[in-house]
Image: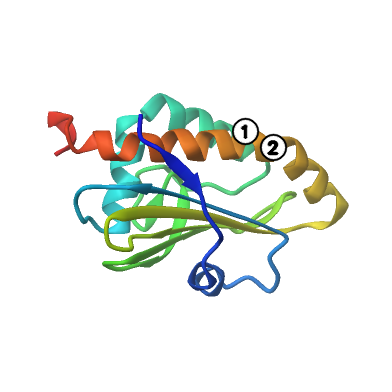
Amino acid sequence: MFQVAQVPVPLRARELAGLERVDYADAFAVDVPVRRTPEEWLRLSVTASPALFNAVRLVHRALGLHLAQADSPGHMIGWDVLRNDSEEAVLGNGGGILGTPRIVCLTPPGQVMVATLIQLNGIGGRAIWAATAPLHRAVARYVLSRMPMLLSEPEHV
């Protein structure tokens, strides 16, 4: 596994999230030896850990998030692809009882950075996220720690 660092949430991630307010935000980064688009990194991570992302989708449903089919056009892990270019990708969800979450992936030279930003819905959303956040951070760290290895696995090159 590779060293994943929790980093300050970049201002650009906050801008890209497009939320009225941000009640929760985190960002994690890992060094990578090659440059790929944010979408490529995200899709590689999903295909490399299908069981994990199936479980993530179950948790998202339990949190009341509205999900499309995982592989439907314009979606990734069932979330809407709100932005996708060579250096930035944003996944969004209409929310539900939790609130309105965004996943922002940035690829500064030599790194992959993933930020999660959420506008929580009141006390209920805050309580749900307080219980869920530690699991979210563990999954985010794990997924990012595998990204550099994805390049050496023949089926993912």
Residue 3, placed above or below residue 82: above
Residue 136 sits in which quadrant? Answer: top right
Whole-percent x, y for residue 39 in the image: 31, 55
Q: Is residue 33 left or right of residue 83?
A: left
The label on residue 135 is 1
Q: Residue at x 51, y 55 (%)?
A: 115
Residue 148 sits in which quadrant? Answer: top left
- Whether the residues at callouts 2 and 1 have beta carbons within 8 Å, the answer is yes
- Say which quadrant the N terminus sits in: top left
Whole-percent x, y for residue 141 in the image: 48, 38
Q: Who is closer to the viewer here, 40 or 147?
A: 147
Q: Who is closer to the viewer here, 119 or 33?
A: 33
Q: Residue at x 40, y 38 (%)?
A: 3
- Count of marks, rendered view: 2
Q: Residues within 10 Å of mark 1 (few under 14, many from 20)?
A: few
Q: Residue furthest right?
A: 123
- Say which quadrant the C terminus sits in: top left
Whole-percent x, y for residue 42 in the image: 35, 48
Q: Helix or strand or loop: what does disc 2 sit on?
A: helix
Q: Who is closer to the viewer here, 138 or 118?
A: 138
Q: Is residue 130 left or right of residue 52?
A: right
The label on residue 25 is none
Q: CA distance from mark 2 to mark 1?
A: 6 Å
Q: Is residue 110 left or right of residue 93?
A: left
Q: Residue at x 52, y 34 (%)?
A: 139
- Amino acid carrying mark 2 in the image: Thr
- Amino acid carrying mark 1 in the image: Leu
Query: What coloring was used for the rendering?
Result: rainbow
The label on residue 132 is 2
